Amino acid sequence: MYLHRLKFKIEAGKIAACLVIFMLFSLVWVAQPDTAGAKTLSSDAAESLTIRVGYAKGTFAPVKEFTDSDFAGAQQQAYSFIDRLPAPCTTAATGIPLTKLLSEAGIDFNKVKSFAFWATDIPGAPYKTFTKDYLYEDRYYYPNIVEYWNAETQDFKAVDEDSVTDMTYRVLEDRVRVDPMMCVSDNWQRFQPPNFGVQDTSVKYRLLFGQREHDITGVIPTADNSAKWIYQIDVTLDGTPVTGVSLDKSSAAIGVGATEQLTATVTPGSATDKSVTWSSSDTAVATVSSTGLVKGVATGSATITATTVDGGFTAACDVVVGSSTGEPSRGTKKTEENVVDPVAGGTVSLGSDVSVNIPAGALKGIIDLKVDIQKIASPPKAPSGFTMLGSSFEFTVDGSKSYSFAKPVTLTFTFDAASLSSGATPSVHYYDEVSGQWVNLGGSVSGGAITVTAEHFAKYAVFAKDEEKAVVPGPVVPNPLEAFSDIKGHWAEKTIGEMVSLGAINGYDDGFFKPDNNITRAEFTTLLMKALIKTGLMPLQGGRVIADTKGHWAQEYIASAASYGIVSGYDDNTFGPDDLVTREQMAVMVVKACDLAPGAAEIQFTDSDAISGWARDAVETMVKDSVMAGYPDNTFQPQGKATRAEAITTLSKALSMNSN
């Protein structure tokens, strides 16, 4: 096998030769590979090497810190490469293979996607980032690279030796495969064979890896990849990062010797590593097992915390431990007005305006809790087409404005029945703070009272909708381009106006549309279904309610979308309605909703490999039809969070194709 050599054109004559020699010596201090692109010569060697691990677009958590003492069993390895002169170089290095460091840090090499190396002389960003495939491609050390180098022509010698006329071939024939190594010391030299008798520790910690076969035949400079002063390595794993964690209880009360099971829910449901660790702030009061089982040890209080292994997100539950008989600890019994015993239940009212009946076991724990009802001075505006009857009320349990009950409670409101116009229908609504919308719960009307069951506390009010009210001639919806000042001049201004006019989406109560805010899975599903309903493509229909959407303001839209096969949960019981929708999730939902014809498109984004397998066909279809595109930096960002403007524009383009 003969491989071509790169020939350098140089002028003949003594002047050219002198210039070459001058350049070789004058540029030695500039082109040394051990500078690793250093911006300043005053940088110091790293005192330790930290390995962090995480997922793309997620957080990175430190898992192991190495110091010189951890390199006591280091091995010696020679490396060769070409620098930018070009000239042959060798390094006699002492270090530990990168794969071994990963193993000692508890990282599964098979799950690694890429590495980012941080150097002390490069602030604010990694010095080098390599994919695992590139870094661990077959790489070699060439033991005879110096011997066969021709300094005059800056190329490999071509002499007749043992019938081999091209020494490049001999170099390649003698190659030795080497793996990436993190070194605590080395001896870099130009035009000299490796010398392990001299070692320099001022360059630690240094990344070294061999050359690919074609690097040497083309004399491609590879010395600048051998970076020094590495103090941190960020290891990116292949998967979906964790964005948060919650517990099924924010407070609990147990007796000494009794137990309480806590359950942690990690979001999103598609996260690769959902494992959590548990801890107690006071193990003398309460302990917690590795599965979240809390056990009362002594009277008092303790905070139980669940922490995600990926990202370090936390959620806590305050636990009060009473006596073994189940009585609360001394001093915890409440004596204020409107207190309710969780075991017995009770009724709390605000005059004759409203009352709440709390059945036994609806409140969590065994300690009396204060239930409070207050009128809201400035309630959110009424939904379009509804009129508020009387006042709006806010309900709290021990100060919590969003308390969730173990079983439903009954709310009863009074209103002036005589004030209702003919055909008007009263109904109870609660205000969803996330969506900024009133959610209709209906209710049972008897004279001047309306009763409804609820599973959580929030802001509540009674509204009346006049079914027989005549339609007012002319436009009844203000021009969205005038109503929302923050969309004027926005790149999606026209499309937003069209979708608002269609009735598929609304702005916020503060008068803004907030086009660049991210959109949740519930919000996007609602936008999708409303657009399909308004355009007559499909009616709203009932369907199975996914467990974590029960009582959610978007419940009926999510159930309807699920019945059509447009959406599905992370699993049978988890939809994650308040998770932010990702671009690849949006692509899948739109393709299904608009029944776009599948078609392969050659995706050439730099992050195409990050597109999940279950979403690839949908993304290809969206790109083929120009419904979605990448960003100016040629990325698609499949796990990136979609904005309201992006979601509206994507859906509008898809609907336009569907109607053609």
Image (cartoon, rainbow, N blue to C red):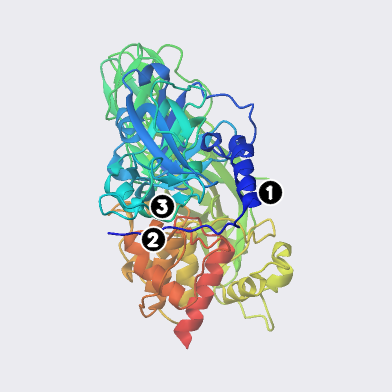
Q: Is residue 233 left or right of residue 260?
A: right
Please state which of residues 501 and 586 is positioned toward the viewer in this rendering.
586
Dot 2 or dot 3, earlier in sequence = 2
Dot 2 or dot 1, earlier in sequence = 2
The residue under label 2 is 4
Q: Is residue 169 left or right of residue 390?
A: left
> In this orientation, does residue 155 appear?
yes
Q: Is residue 149 above or below residue 535?
A: above
The residue under label 1 is 378
| Amino acid of disc 3 | Asp
**The N terminus lies in which quarter of the figure?**
bottom left
| Amino acid of disc 1 | Ser
- Give how far apart the Cα atoms at labels 3 and 1 are: 72 Å
Q: Is residue 204 above or below residue 605?
A: above
**Camera-nearest label, 2 or 3:** 2
* Residue at 28 percent of width and 15 percent of height: 325
Question: Residue 424 lies in what quarter of the image?
Answer: bottom right
Please state which of residues 369 and 517 is positioned toward the viewer in this rendering.
517
Disc 2 + disc 1, Cβ < 8 Å? no
**Camera-nearest label, 2 or 1:** 2
Label 2: which secondary element: loop
Provide residue 356's location: percent of width, then percent of height.
47, 42
Dot 3 or dot 1, earlier in sequence = 3
Question: Residue 120 lies in what quarter of the image?
Answer: top right
Q: Is residue 529 above or below residue 236?
A: below
The residue under label 3 is 215
Q: Residues within 10 Å of mark 3 (few under 14, many from 20)?
A: some
